[in-house]
Amino acid sequence: MFPLGEIPGEEFKSFISDGLVAFAENPENLTEGILAVTGGHPYYTQQLSFSRHLPMSAAFCLENQIESPSTVYSGLLRLSRQGYLIKVDDRYRIDDPIFERWIVKRRIV
């Protein structure tokens, strides 16, 4: 095993930001948030920044204080298998419109 150290800040920020342009309104702020969480660790920065399954998972994880995009994905899969969510194109949505309204009305903003 070859341990990787932190990647120099400005180079890493630029690389991550460029990759998030298509997915985030403000990729620079998102990048700074990601690096604040990961401390510049290459593996964890990659995991948080570029999930294969959920391109917006980095922003979602930061906003909702979730440590890993895989947690979001496994939750979506579990809720889909239980019949609560359905996948439409590349998005998930609550299958029952009445339940959806109930959830939306009670969510904490």
Image: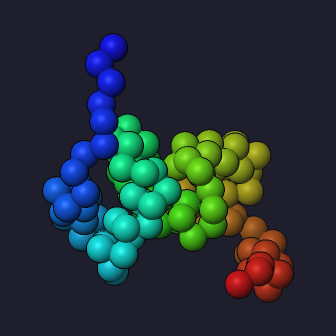
* Location of residue 75 with respect to 26 vertically, above or below: above
Residue 83 in the image, given as x and y percentages of width and height:
74, 51
Q: Quadrant of the C terminus?
A: bottom right
Question: Quick check: 97 above or below 7?
Answer: below
Q: Quadrant of the N terminus?
A: top left
Residue drawn where x is 77% and y is 79% of the image: 107
Image coordinates of residue 85 in percent, x first then y, are 67, 57
- Quarter of the image for residue 81 reads top right
Badge count: 0
Q: Position of residue 25 (x, y in %)?
A: 34, 80
Residue at 30 percent of width and 31 percent of height: 4
- Which is nearer the eye, 43 or 91? 43
Which residue is drawn at the image coordinates 55% and 60% (left, top)?
61
Q: Relative to 65, is 108 on the left or the right?
A: right
Residue 47 in sight here: no
Q: Residue at 59% across / 51% down in the picture? A: 67
